[in-house]
Amino acid sequence: MAEPIRVLLVDDQRLMRDGLRTLLELEPDLAVVGEAGEGQEALDVYAAAQPDVVLMDIRMPVMDGVEATWRLCARWPEARVIILTTFDDDAYVFDGLRAGALGYLLKAVSGQELAEAIRTVAAGGALIEPSVARKVVAEFARLAAPARPLDSTLPEPLSEREVEILRLMGQSLTNREIALKLSLAEGTVKNYVTTILQKIGARDRTQAALRAQDLGLL
C-alpha cells in the first residue's frame, strides 16, 4: 500500500483545524502530520514534518498566509501549498498565486472536494476554485496582448480535438467532465491533456487556462 499523502494544516482557528483534521482522517490515503496557528509557526512545522501538501489560511496573526506561502516556496521550491480561505477577494487571489500556491479553494468546499484537491496538488497538479479561476482568466485577459493565430504562436500546432479540449480546460472542467461532454474515456482525455500541456508549454491546468485565453479560445 502506498504511503499516505502527508498534510500540514495552517489556520489560526483551532476549531477549524480540528474540523479539517476530522474530515481528512476519514480518507485512508491522507494523513495530517502537523498543525500551525500562523505563518511563522507553519515554517517551523514544515521544516520538521516535511509534508507533501500544506493547507494555508490567508488571514492570520504574526505572519499571514501569503507571506508564509512565499517564504515556504522560496526556501523549499518543492512545497505544494493550497490556499484555503473564506475570502475570494481579488488581491488575496493574485497575491496567493504569485506567492507560489498551486491551489486556491474557499472553505465552503465539501470534504470530498478538499480531499480531491489535496490529491491533485500532491500529484503535481493545480486546482483553483471555479469562481476564483474566472477572476484569474479575466485579469489575464485585461493584461494580455491581443491573441495571435494559433499556428503563429505554437511550435507544434494543436489538432482540432486538442483545441476543443483546451477550450474546455480553460472553462475549469475536470478530465471527467470533459470526457462526459465529448463522449471520450477519461484516460483518453488525460492523455490529450498531457500532450496539450507539452505543446503549449504550460506546467499545469491553471497555466493552460491562461494560455487558452491568450490564444483566443475563451
Image: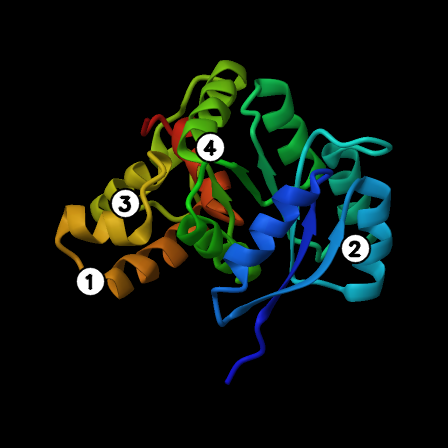
**Which of these two is toward me, 158 or 86?**
86
On screen, residue 108 above or below 89: below
Work out whether 47 lies above or below 97. below
Distance from disc 4 to disc 3, alpha carbons, whole Å, reads 14 Å
State the image quarter where residue 93 is shown.
top right
User: Does label 4 or label 3 sit earlier along the sequence?
Assistant: 3
- Quarter of the picture holding the C terminus: top left
SS type, badge 2: loop
Q: Which residue is mark 1?
A: 185
> Which residue is identified by label 2?
76
Q: Residue at x 36, y 36 (%)?
A: 170
Q: Nearer the viewer, mark 4 or mark 1?
A: 1
**Above or below, comparing residue 124 to residue 71 in the picture:** below
Identity of the residue drawn at 69% across and 38% down: 13
Residue 145 position in % (x across, y down): 50, 18
Residue found at the far bottom of this picture? 1
Give the residue number, with chain letter if any, for mark 3: 165
Res. 210 mark: 4
Could you tell which of marks 2 and 4 lies nearer the N-terminus?
Answer: 2
The amino acid type found where label 1 is placed reads Ala
Callouts 4 and 1 close, C-beta under 8 Å: no
Name the one closer to the observer, 131 or 145. Answer: 131
Secondary structure at badge 4 equals: helix
Q: Is residue 161 left or right of residue 36?
A: left
The type of residue carrying mark 2 is Trp
**Pointer 4 local density, CA inside 10 Å: few below 14, some 14–19, many at least 20:** many
